[in-house]
């Protein structure tokens, strides 16, 4: 990973600041009092904002610390001649700064990406979380992960890894649900 001419301590502090800023101003977060459920049995369903899209959601819970999030996606069905892609992703939930920041960064990274690109990013993020602080080895992967590389330090702490992965698991599950619904 690039060190930008900084000491390990300075780099760690910069990463912590990025995580805290992303947690303070999370992208894609929808207030709890605003309904975005894609469940057809819910009182209010997610309004599909894009033609050719299938909505889906997944609720994730980390029993270790109590973090929880519901990730809502709109996945294009490919009938518009474009590859299946994540046209919209939003979330609701609460938790520690790591889970909230990871959700925010994930939204920025995967919204607008093809399903294949988003799944590859999720895999690269998992690899980062397994690195025990070493980061990803491929420069291309580091570049694709963008701001998500700030979670490298989190990978040193096994109890915090689940916090960082919460939203990514929800994204994968909700996209899988949307793809399944397309095939019905």
Image (cartoon, rainbow, N blue to C red):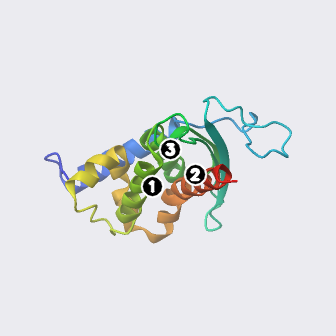
Circle on res. 84: 3
Q: Position of residue 114 (x, y in %)?
A: 44, 44
Q: Is 4 placed above or below 51 here?
A: below
Query: Position of 168 compared to 50: left or right?
Result: left
Q: Is residue 35 above or below residue 152?
A: above
Q: Which residue in the structure is indicated by mark 2?
A: 175
Residue at 31%, 45% (x, y): give it.
14
* Identity of the residue furthest to the left in this view: 5
Q: Between residue 126 and residue 157, name the one nearer to us.
A: 126
Q: Earlier in the sequence, mark 2 or mark 1?
A: 1
Relative to 17, is 39 on the left or the right? right
Quote the CA–CA distance across marks 2 and 1.
9 Å
Determine contact: label 2, label 1, CB under 8 Å.
yes
Q: Which residue is mark 1?
A: 119
Foreground disc of the pair 2, 3: 3
Compared with residue 180, is residue 30 higher up or lower down, i.e. above or below?
above
Q: Residue at x 36, y 59 (%)?
A: 124
Quadrant in the picture for the N terminus: bottom left
């Amino acid at each position: 990973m690039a060190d930008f001419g900084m000491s390990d301590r300075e780099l760690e502090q910069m990463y912590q600041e990025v995580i805290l800023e992303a947690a303070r101003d999370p992208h894609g977060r929808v207030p709890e009092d605003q309904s975005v459920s894609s469940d057809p049995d819910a009182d209010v369903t997610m309004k599909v904002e894009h033609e050719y899209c299938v909505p889906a959601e997944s609720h994730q819970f980390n029993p270790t610390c109590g973090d929880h999030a519901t990730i809502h996606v709109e996945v294009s069905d490919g009938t518009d001649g474009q590859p299946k892609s994540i046209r919209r992703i939003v979330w609701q939930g609460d938790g520690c700064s790591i889970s909230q920041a990871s959700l925010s960064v994930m939204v920025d990274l995967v919204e607008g990406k093809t399903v294949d690109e988003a799944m590859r990013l999720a895999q690269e993020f998992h690899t980062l979380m397994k690195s025990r602080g070493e980061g990803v080895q491929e420069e291309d992967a580091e570049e694709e992960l963008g701001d998500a590389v700030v979670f490298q330090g989190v990978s040193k702490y096994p109890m915090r890894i689940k916090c960082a992965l919460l939203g990514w698991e929800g994204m994968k599950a909700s996209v899988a649900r949307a793809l399944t619904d397309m095939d019905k």
